Image (tube, rainbow, N blue to C red):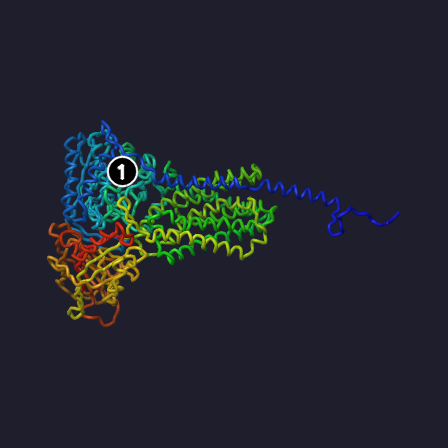
Amino acid sequence: MSSEIRRRPGLTRSNYTPLVNESENEKSQKIDQEECSNQLKTQHWALIFIYLGIIILGACHLHTCMPQPKEPNSDDVQFSETRAAKILEELSDYGWKPAGSYNCEVLARNRILRELQEIQKTSISHFDIETQYVSGCFDIPAHDTEGMNICYRNVSNVIARLGAKKYEGKEIAVLLNCHYDSYPTSSAGSDDLSSCALMLELIRIYAKHPVFLNHNIIFLFNGAEESSLLAAHGFITQHPWRHQIRAFINLEASGSGGRELLFQAGPANQWLLNSYLEAAVHPHCSVLGQEVFQSGVYPGDTDFRIFRDHGRIPGLDLAFVQNGYWYHTEFDEAKRITKGSLQRAGENVFAVINHLMSAPYLESPAEYTDHKSVFFDFLGLFVVIYPLSFAHVLNVTIVLASLFFAANRVAKNSWIFFIALRDYIIITISMLFILFVMSKMSVFTYGALRWYTRQWLALIAYGFPTIWAGLTVQSLLSARRNPKSRKEYAACLEVVHLVFLSGILVVFTYYNIASGFIFTLLCLPILKIVVQFLGFIGDCPTLQTLLTLLLSFPGLSMSIYTTEMLLTIFIPIMGRTPTNPELVVGIFVFFSSFNIVMSLIGLTPRSRNSRDPSETRIGDFIYTIFGVILATLTVLLVFASIWPSPFRFDERYPTAKRTQFFHTNQLFYNRDGSVAVNESRLYAISLDFRGPEDIPFVKSDPEYTMISCFYPNNPFCEVPYLFPNRGRINEKNMRVRKLEETPKFPKSVKILQISKKRGEIDGAACIDYRFSVIGTSQISVYLIPDSIWAITNTSVSAPEIPQHDMFLYFTCSNPSNLCEWIFDVQIRQISHEISDDKPLLVGVSNHYLHGPHMLSKTLTNLREKVFEMRPTNPEWTINPSAWNVDQVYRHF
């Protein structure tokens, strides 16, 4: 018998495998098939993208959803936008209404007074009407401008008081406030005549139904808010009815309709906030709005500050915040206010007041303890509120649980956990890199603000590329893992993300920031980790997908809803801020895109991946990132060719470039009293980051030059702003040119030195001045001592510490538009250097904000040219806010 080993045909030593190994291969193939069956397939991702689309579209719809305007009902107990809109349109049609103007003090004020008197004739409630002309001085801290010191004279208020019974002098009242004056070049349709029309409609209801009035309601129509909150200060510090007030509701607008937002509540007095949260028919509120506004990030202020700081009473601040393109512009007219906005706001305010009238809060507010709360409306459907102390307990629980699960994963497989941590950082950095590069490229290729009119372009520029990059990088990193280890890898990624969110919660909890509720909601998928840890769910891909989508729904919904709210509020604001807006808008969008990507971070590794590990080298990551950037830029450049300007003139919905033009007569003196400059200049100011190069006649005229300060120590650089805005004085946003036309004014601006007395305080030289300023009803005064001197006192307001410069603002209501102010200034020497004999530079700007001398021929022609060109030429889509200024600077 042959010893030769017989082999089957076709087999060689190189490809021969023993039979025992063949069974192992079959077993391995079976395991691989099971792994494949547990992977997410195309239908799962289709479900995910449908789910995300529904959330995005649903959040956008709910954000803009308005009730239908209602007609008055038979017994007049229903708020009616239809009736309120009639007087609103009439008041709006009076035109520009700055404080002190004929339109404000005669037309608007008397029309409101006449309407109140008509309602009073048929009232069965006790109804008082008063007018107030008030004067005073106060200082106001920095808000959208720098801090300043204010004096006012003869500003007007119209006040109505309603009650169920005759007044006995010990009444309790709730105050409602609006203002009927306007920004100098605005009709004030929304800001704030819409609120005044709302209040008039409420007065009609309460006048016929004293049954609602367990206490008094005071309605304040104030005539000087835009001049820095003057009339409210006069009322709350001087009117005798102020002593009745236990709470107030301030009604404002920084947009033109839409859902009014409760963005401030307090100080303290949780019962007042609860009244809104319990009673509002259409709640729209967020502690995020309150914390953002009070941080100073939002450029604005309201009468809420005055009632809170000078009246020491708690209140609610409600404002229309959508469609902010027309805020303080000629386009703020009643016809552009979103239909249903007044109905919604009126029903809310009516319900809240009725709740306050019937609740025990007003009679004994001290019995109701104060505590800071977390509150927000969920997609506008209902309100969630809980104490901040409970939020802290919840946050700490999430943090401890996150650390526990992280420790468990490290103990189970530390190598995979730290790989997951590394990959999480890579994904985050990739998305941030896309955000940063796109923000720079947007400015480089377009000059910023491409999304200004078409807000969805912000999603194209920042949302889609960051999501695309995040998911693609996830896919690349997952492909590098062995299919058998992807389940553990996915679980580790989820825990790493949870630890990251927990770190944010630690910061918010430590600093008592209530806005952390969004991150608390984003941590809800921890419940999935809990049930997985307890072994209640397996690896079924459908179950994994559904559970992930279900638990991420609250957090993602609030993320997208919050982003939608922030974009609709802040994108119009970006048209009046001189800083680069791209990163701001990009961060808002990134907040949602990051949360979307990270909510899916545990599903991507569990998905089928056709990539070979050899296709996941560093070069592939680089190609992916730059491919995303290139593709996005290509799409954006196509849109840029279609819409070369970010601005659009549409009579129904204009989104114009915000500009200011000051035709200024300037008279500057040298120290020796000789005239150094006596000329007329036109200041062209772009309020947005794109600068004055977007203004066609500035771009094409070489006579427009950069600004230069005549007085080297003048921080205001002789720029005739109405309020102190030295942060806006820069070369990028401002151009100036000389003009031949010199506006003629009835009385030239004068600053007269009445007295000057030298003395000594605590061994330091001091000088006491008394000045007289004669000018218009709106006067800005700049006090700038030499560097070795400081301002220690004025008769307007005494600074807490010596100041190197001060801004004084004088306003009065006078039909002749002529006022005189006498004020004192004390400066003290802070250095032993030799001082000049005239160490104080005083500047005065007279602003002609109304009347026949408001616009020179140059400004009139400029505005007419803009009105002619902008309907057909996007480059001329400009809102030209303009007036004349008479300015003088001299040393004393």
Q: Position of residue 535 (x, y in %)?
A: 58, 38
Q: Residues within 10 Å of mark 1 (few under 14, many from 20)?
A: many
Identity of the residue furthest to the bottom in this view: 834
Nearest the viewer among 422 and 892 is 422
In this rendering, is residue 117 above or below 644? above
Identity of the residue furthest to the right in this view: 1
Q: Position of residue 25 (x, y in %)?
A: 69, 44
Name the side, left or right, on which 415 lies relative to 112. right
- The image quarter containing residue 672 is bottom left
Nearest the viewer among 856 and 670 is 856
Nearest the viewer among 257 and 282 is 257
Inspect the image, locate mark 1, and give the three-letter code of the amino acid beneath it.
Leu
Label 1 residue SS: helix
Q: Position of residue 780 (x, y in %)?
A: 20, 57
Q: Position of residue 449 (x, y in %)?
A: 34, 53
| Residue 292 seen in render | yes
Identity of the residue furthest to the top in this view: 74
- The image quarter containing residue 381 is top left
Q: Residue at x 22, y 27 (%)?
A: 75
- The image quarter containing residue 194 is top left
> Which residue carries the number 1 mark?
342
How many circles with numbers are drawn on the protein?
1
Q: Quadrant of the C terminus?
A: bottom left
In this rendering, is residue 259 above or below 153? above
| Residue 294 seen in render | no
